[in-house]
Amino acid sequence: MKQPAAYQVRTRRWLVLGAFALGFSLVIVRAFDLQVMQRDFLQGEGDARQLRVVSLPAHRGMILDRHGEPMAVSTPVDAVWANPRITLAQAPDLSALAAVLGMDEAALNERLSSRAQREFVYLRRQVTPDVAAQVTELNIAGVGLRREYRRYYPLGEAAAQLLGVTNIDDEGQEGLELAFESQLAGAPGAKRVLRDLHGRVIRDVEHIRAPRPGQNLQLTIDQRLQYLAYRELKSAVQAHGARAGSAVLMDIRTGDLLAVVNQPSLNPNNRETLHPDSFRNRAFIDVLEPGSTLKPFIVMAALQSGQVQPSSLLETSPGTMRVGSHTVRDIRNYGRIDVSTMLVKSSNVGATQLALQLEPRQMWQTLFRAGFGQRTGSGFPGEASGILRDFIDWREVDRAVLGFGYGVSVTLLQLTRAYAALAHEGQMVQPRLLMTEAAPRFETVMPVESAELVMQMLESSVGREGTGWRAAIEGYRIAGKTGTTRKAGPGGYLEGRYQALFAGVAPASDPRLALVVMIDEPSGNEFFGGQVAAPVFRNIMSGALRLLDIPPDHLPELRTVADPSRGGPA
């Protein structure tokens, strides 16, 4: 029986209404599930795509000289980064970006493609402000800038081996930058930011943690003296065609290191030329046989033994002396001379006679108490202790060559400290690189009377008849000693290769500064310490005395330039 048309209409109406009601119910249920049941999960997923926690770099502490002038400072720069998935999907043509960054377009595409699963890839670190501005103007999807810091060194090559260098993340890698990393490095901060679909930051949402800047480091170094010493050392190395050179300048009264320089050096501001071996600080790390610069301490041991006085006579004729199968030589026959003249003329034969007269234990104790064979405690990383063998193992020839500075190895810093102790009435101070309010602590390592006698001899060594006359400075009394050593190699001493040294203090009447200069492998006919290193000492020391306003002690005889024929080289 056919149902009435009205019934069919009502049926269809209810079916449609039921379908709408069911659909609406499903929407309500789904909305409830999304808004209530899965709210936390979906919120987290949304945040993960739009909110990011980014690191805030901390400003690295500055390295300052003793007057507060910057020697190392970190300046803000930008790094260019990209989200490879976004950049490759929305900016297929990267030629303009590659040109701005100075990269090959194919290399740029390969860099992004090979890291397509990452959300963050550096494209160029530490770019200039101009490059950063050009990148911003390109407005490329997924490409942005990130703030970081770059280390700059105002003194450049003049302090490279002392300060060291940081890596591209501003972390210390060499020198004082490495030694005091924990103090200089700050703690990075963090903030939450909102990014758009292209990965660009829209706004800051929350500061989670503020960055903590690093602490400044103030050195005892005087930037003026550092540059002065480096300039004179570099000039001498170039003039003599030398392989290398080093110099250490120290305040005798405090132990403050005022200048530590090395050649050859490098520019730490140009990272493309950096090589780890170039940062070796030879003044602290390299050891050498001190040659005749050790003779004052042999004389000191002899004076302490009570066996000799400055006027005691030594027979050096005929200018040679046999010790076992070895021959000790002077550059000329000095004949019968006293101990003081032996030091002034730098007689190897006379020094050998003194050394052989001494008990091995006493000579070893004098050298050890002068700081040889042990680290100075300067705090510089990798500082060498040198070599001073136990006297029990000494043979006769070992004692003989020790008299003129062979068979023992020292650093330039050790030698500087030892001469400073001689000048400070036999009191030794620990060298220091960091400024401190603590008073320097001295240790008596030599008798006052003996130290004063040796100082008088060293002053004569720079006089008219001494080997160090080229170190004389007009208006000042200078005390010092020349030294020349043959370089050792795998098969013994190398023919024609020398190290020229001069160690001294000024002004001799009231010592303030100790300076040691070493020139490694000078070429040509001039290779003696008196010829090569003494003039460098004079130039550095005269400039330091002037800059530090240290008054002259007016000795008229030093105002007359000595004649080259006076005194032999050593």
Image: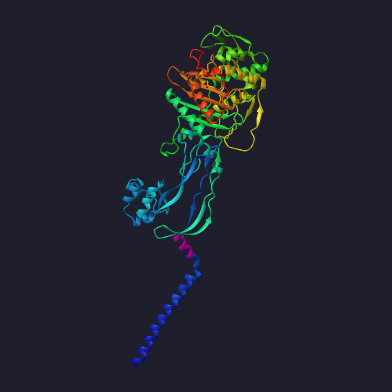
Task: Classify 275 as above or below 358.
Answer: below
- Magenta span: chief secondary structure: helix
Q: Quadrant of the N terminus?
A: bottom left
The magenta region covers 43-50
The image's colouring method is rainbow
Q: Nearer the viewer, residue 151 or 25?
A: 151
Identify the residue at horizontal 62%, vertical 22% (top origin): 367
Q: Nearer the viewer, residue 147 or 222?
A: 222
Left or right of 558: which side holds 135?
Answer: left
> Which quadrant of the view contains residue 22?
bottom left
Q: How many marks?
A: 0
Q: Position of residue 178 (x, y in %)?
A: 53, 39
x then y, percent, for residue 34? 47, 70
Q: Is residue 46 magenta?
A: yes
Q: Can you give x and y, in whole percent of width and height, for residue 37 in the image?
A: 50, 70
Whether 407 is among the magenta residues is no
Residue 552 seen in this snapshot: yes
Between 535 and 402, the residue placed more toward the observer is 535
Can you give x and y, in whole percent of width and height, for residue 204 in the image? 47, 59
238 on left or right of 317: left
State the residue lying farthest toward the right: 306
For the question of whether residue 490 can be seen, the reply is no
Q: Nearer the viewer, residue 550 or 280?
A: 550
Task: Please report the residue visible at 34 percent of the width from the left and 48 percent of the height from the top.
Answer: 98
> Vertical placement of 418 versus 158: above or below?
above
